[in-house]
Amino acid sequence: MKQERCVPRHVAIIMDGNGRWAQQRNQLRAVGHRAGLKTVRKIVTYAASIGIKVLTLYAFSSENWKRPPTEVSALISLFIYALKREMKNLNKNNVRLNIIGDISRFSYQLQQMISNAEQLTKNNSGLVLNIAANYGGRWDILQSTKKITTKVLNGEITLDDITEECLGLEMSMHELPDVDLVIRTGGDYRISNFLLWQIAYSELYFTDILWPDFTQALFDEAINVFNTRERRFGGILTQEHSC
Ligand code: FPP
């Protein structure tokens, strides 16, 4: 009997290739990022429609500040534009929006917008959409470590209380299911300081397709490949872990 396709609960995406997509068309890199936003819209809608519970997108890494100031400001403006333009629609579609990352480096105005967007959607029960903004996997481990260290210094816990679980509880997205599948577009085979702790047992899928060209059909293809993977989580295959 043919087994039902399993839809991963949590998919995380490194949306790479916007710049090259624009360069191939003799356009500014910012044009590629705008085209990338259109793909974000399509993929978010599709993810919700096929029953993915959590989608995490790498929009702006802690290292992206190293880009030319014009590109940094184009990326931040696009983020503000997307928050302004998409919030109502996301809310109407029952999406819960979370921003992960060190937002303290953003302007007060943007921090307020982020907080309003999270407040507006916090009771929604549909897709959880995490946008990683000024996010780095090492930053995440560091901020968790600092919180735990503070607890030790305050005498709230002892050194022996520090376990993987304890550290994990301070990490971004700790309240959500683990990442099942990481997709990276744009042809590179690396994680680029995206989620580190959270992808310990994730399946990884790489494609040469540039992010603005990524489609629902290609997303489906990634899920099909995910379905061919045998996830053992360091143990042996069990019914419970077969998806
Ligand atoms: C990587 O492409 C992409 C980014 C650094 C930004 C991704 C942003 C978007 C898709 C649009 C905004 C999204 C939201 C959620 C507001 P790259 O510039 O590194 O491309 P390259 O490798 O071809 O140079």
Image: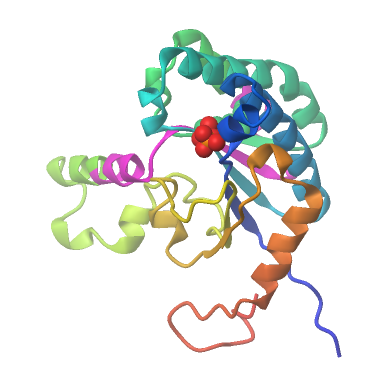
Q: Position of residue 37 (x, y in %)?
A: 68, 29
200 vs 21, nearest the viewer: 21
Is residue 208 visible in the rendered structure shown here? yes
Instruction: Name the side, left or right, on which 224 lies relative to 69.
Output: right
Magenta residue span? 116-145
76 vs 91, nearest the viewer: 76
117 vs 3, nearest the viewer: 3
Quarter of the picture for ligand 1? top right
Q: Position of residue 109 (x, y in %)?
A: 51, 9
| Magenta stretch: includes residue 10 | no
| Magenta stretch: includes residue 143 | yes
Instruction: Name the side, left or right, on which 209 lies relative to 180.
Output: right
Instruction: Name the side, left or right, on which 65 lies relative to 24.
Output: left
Q: Position of residue 108 (x, y in %)?
A: 45, 10
Please report the residue visible at 16 percent of the width from the left and 40 percent of the height from the top.
154
Q: Position of residue 19 (x, y in %)?
A: 57, 30
Please report the residue visible at 48 percent of the width from the left and 12 percent of the height from the top.
70
Q: Classify 150 as above or below 5.
A: above
Q: Quadrant of the C terminus?
A: bottom right
Q: How is the image coloured?
A: rainbow
Please report the residue visible at 46 percent of the width from the left and 59 percent of the height from the top.
199
